[in-house]
Image: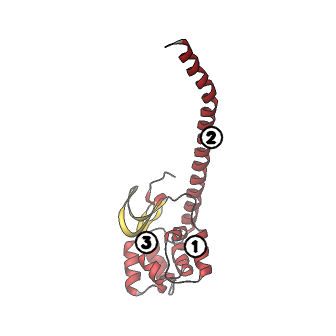
Amino acid sequence: MRKPDFLLMVLALLIAGPSAWAQDSDTARLKETADFVAQTQRDTQRGEIALAPIRSTSELASYLQAHKTSPFDALSERSRKLFMESLVFTDQGLGSYRYRELEAQLSPRQAFELLSLFGAQKTMAYLQFSNGSAKEHAAVAKLAPIFLDDHKGYRCIPPATCVLASDHICIGANCGMYPP
């Protein structure tokens, strides 16, 4: 390598080096912040699920037996059956559910009441409701998480796998995709 070429290369490294390092540093800080926010969001969701009255098939049966009326009543008998048969529970809580009947038959408020039983109310941000007021639809939009760890169009197959399945939402943290 000729001396002028070498000097140009050294000069280019000296000029680009600090800015390249700064970009790497900014990227690392951004990733660190994003990871922190995503983990905080998952922790919040896990807290909501831990406080939910239904986290398993046996808790669902107990709830239905103890409550003569419930948010499930807003669904037609056929839709209630389809929804309940679609529920996948893991040791973390509700792993996935079928959403099509919720979109078609419930208002956002009714769906919130139903999904809150499972601690899954934030997954409503994925749904497109046929019913409900503009105010309810606006409230649903505010539920959208910053990082989407849940997967519309997928169903939970424990442990830790979301597989393609139309009309389902796989709840990533509960399916086991993200370690506690």
Residue in the image at 45% along x and 68% along y: 56
User: What residue is shown with label 1?
Assistant: 140
Camera-side residue of 110 and 141: 141
Q: What amino acid is labelled 1 in the image?
A: Val
- Please tell me the numbered disc located at residue 5: none
Camera-side residue of 161 and 19: 19
Q: Is mark 1 on a helix, strand or loop?
A: helix
User: What residue is shown with label 3?
Assistant: 58
Q: Is mark 3 on a helix, strand or loop?
A: helix
Label 1 close to label 3 by CB (< 8 Å): no
Mark whose residue sits in front, 3 or 2:
2
- The location of residue 139, given as percent across then percent down, is 61, 74
Residue in the image at 49% along x and 75% along y: 128
Label 1 close to label 2 by CB (< 8 Å): no
Label 3 close to label 2 by CB (< 8 Å): no
Q: Is mark 2 on a helix, strand or loop?
A: helix
- Please tell me the numbered disc located at residue 26: 2
**Which comes sooner in the sequence, label 1 or label 2?**
2
Circle 2 Cα neighbour tier, 10 Å, few/some/many (<14 / 14–19 / ≥20): few
- The location of residue 67, given as percent across then percent down, is 51, 83
- The location of residue 4, given as percent across then percent down, is 56, 15
